[in-house]
Image: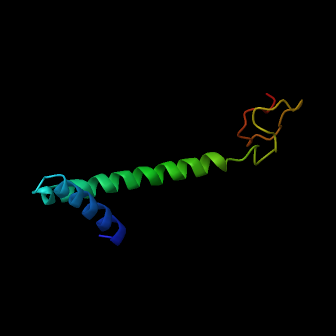
Amino acid sequence: MNDYRKQIVDSAIQGLKEGGFEHAEMFRILLERVYDSGYAEAIRNTWHQFDYNHKPKGCHVCGIEYGKVMGYVCYNDKCPTGLRSR
């Protein structure tokens, strides 16, 4: 177990003990899983935010900007914008 995770779980157990729950150690596995779940969720949220903030503003094939009226269409069949003429 990494040091920070151990510190967090130990602190939670200590808090339970100080709160009057003398058998708090029995929650160690549960607290470790809660920590791991929160960590995994934080990583997912961080990567989602990173992906959201770094999406290209336009098509990598034709350069048409998404959501902007450009006055022309792309004639490239591989264009993912779907703005090509038919």
Q: How many marks?
A: 0
The x and y percentages for residue 66 are 75, 36
Q: Nearer the viewer, residue 4 or 77?
A: 4
Answer left or right for 45 relative to 59.
left
Q: Residue furthest left?
A: 23
Answer left or right for 54 relative to 45.
right
Residue under the image location 25 percent in, 55 percent down: 31
Q: Is residue 70 above or below residue 48?
A: above
Residue under the image location 32 percent in, 62 percent down: 8
The x and y percentages for residue 65 are 79, 39
Quadrant assignment for the C terminus:
top right
Quadrant assignment for the N terminus:
bottom left
Q: Nearer the viewer, residue 52 or 31?
A: 31
Q: Nearer the viewer, residue 63 or 5?
A: 5
Answer left or right for 37 relative to 14.
right
Residue under the image location 23 percent in, 56 percent down: 15
Say which quarter of the image contains residue 80: top right
Residue under the image location 37 percent in, 51 percent down: 38
